[in-house]
Amino acid sequence: MLSRLSIRDVVLIERLELDFSQGLCVLTGETGAGKSILLDSLGLALGARAEARLVRHGADQAVVTAEFDLPANNPTYALLEEHGLSVRGEPLMLRRTLGTDGRSRAFINDQSVSVGLLRQIGEELVEVHGQFDNQRLLNPATHIGLLDAHGGHGALRAEAGRAHHIWREAVRERQRAEDELETAKRDEDYLRHAVEEFRALNPAEGEEAHLANERQLLMHGEKLIDAMNAANKALEGGHGVERMLRDALRALEPVAEKAEGLLDATLKALDSAAEQVALTVNELDIAAGRVDLDPRHLEQVEERLFALRALARKHNVDVVNLPDLFARLTQQLEGIESGGQHLEQLAHAEAQARGTYAQVATALSQARREAALGLDQAVRTELEPLRLGTADFRTTIATSADEASWGESGWDRVAFEVATNPGAPAGPLGKIASGGELSRFMLALKVVLAQSDPVPTLVFDEVDSGIGGAVADAVGQRLARLGEDVQVLVVTHSPQVAARGLAHWHVSKSEEGGAVRTSVTTLSRPERADEIARMLAGANVTSEARAAAQSLLAGAAE
């Protein structure tokens, strides 16, 4: 709820602090005292259009702060967190400054924000009837949500949202497959030729590196053979290393036993070295046997390398990527050949998803029509006591045949419409009803929707315009009932409405030092009686008016 409104230098208000309570709060005062300034100030804090005329004459800027006390689970906190503002658990403060040049700045809990975000948050917290043009109930886009909240359709709406998401994803997947198949078909001849070319060459993983190594061996085969033969001769020939090692062993072995172990390490090393040389000679023989000196083989390797590199250049890839490209092109060609079957499967899945969505949307639509009957009857019941007995209220529900308009909330378009006279055509609330009628229509609707509409604070201005007596009392009763569920602020000229308030403020205008100032006073019970008597009798308050005021207050307290 709105807990405090702080106003600095707005029109005739120099400095004002207002603390609000729950339930029905009323503001009264003579015409021109400045009640509209309070609403303008509140609107400024809620993100309404700022005009330089609102800055008090002689001041540099106007500042308005609206403070709200909200439960920790209020959805407004989640909306703020989506915009990077974490204020959960703290009082929520919306502040707006306005300079004499008409420029304004917006803040939420002292963090600078856009006016657009301030307005978005303000619309979640306060709904004003009769003063601003941006009344939420006048926007048909909000009606479907209000009807669903009233009918308790949350689970059905969530199911419709899930079904719609699955269906639209199936549509997108089928469309993607169609586009890919169409593109692939345009390239079918190219793909077939390319796959045949790849299949003929059949590039293998790592083949280029293997061929390059083989080519290197073939190009230098004779030099390698000569070098290996020379090494072999040095190791194994008549005066080779192996022969000398064996001779050394034979010279030492006869005296080894007499050396008392002194030659053991030497003998072991000589024997190991001789064995290692023998192994090396064997490896050289094997290596020499693997060297290919056939010039035709070199030619074949070079031709293969050339073919691989030519194919890679043709497709603008590295040779190492040819096997992957071969697999990809083959897959695309196979996709064309099996594309029709795949599309049939996707189309079937899409049809199933659409059918599921249609089933849920139908159930949701039927639930709405049933809820609308109850809503319409409940609102009509409220109209007659509000001097709208000849008027009619109806909820229209139209099912769209255009699939493009089907959404997560179903396929219905919902609108609240009124007809102010019997036989007159029904139309949108804001276009059919006059100002006073509109406020009373809104009151009737809000009374019915109070427990399902999440907006915690309602403001009514001119809801009692042009009425009195029993009708004004009926308005007061409904405002009081509404105040049992939400916070209600009412600017009123009706004593019957004023008497119903749990809190009462009086707005007055006075002249101080040649300057006119607007002030607001919280009224005690005796002061309320005096104010209501003034509202009943005018400037000359009689004893009868005082008695009537006491009677109104006593009746409201029952």
Image (tube, rainbow, N blue to C red):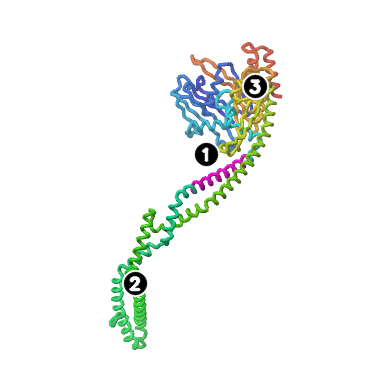
- Structural crowding at the residue carrying mark 3, measured as other residues with C-alpha within 10 Å and reported as few (<14), some (14–19) or many (≥20): few
Amino acid at pointer 3: Ala
- Structural crowding at the residue carrying mark 1, measured as other residues with C-alpha within 10 Å and reported as few (<14), some (14–19) or many (≥20): few
The residue that mark 1 highlights is 82
Q: Secondary structure at mark 2?
A: loop
- Structural crowding at the residue carrying mark 2, measured as other residues with C-alpha within 10 Å and reported as few (<14), some (14–19) or many (≥20): some
On screen, 537 above or below 27? above
Residue 18 location in percent, x, y? 56, 25
- Residue 194: image quadrant is bottom left
Residue 259 location in percent, x, y? 34, 86
User: Residue 173 colored magenta?
Assistant: yes
Q: Can residue 499 be seen in the rendering of this structure?
A: no
- Residue at the spot x=67%, y=30% of the render? 375
Mark 1 touches mark 2? (CB < 8 Å): no
Residue 544 location in percent, x, y? 69, 13
Select label 1 or label 3 by which is in front. 3
The residue that mark 2 highlights is 291
Q: Of the residues under marks 1 and 3, which one precedes in the sequence? A: 1
Q: Of the residues under marks 2 and 3, which one precedes in the sequence? A: 2
In front of the other: 516 or 130: 130
Quarter occupied by the N terminus: top right
Q: Which residues are magenta?
A: 157-180
The residue that mark 3 highlights is 424
Outermost residue toward the front? 189
In front of the other: 366 or 472: 366
Q: CA distance from mark 1 to mark 2?
A: 72 Å
- Is residue 360 toward the left or the right of residue 273 in the image? right
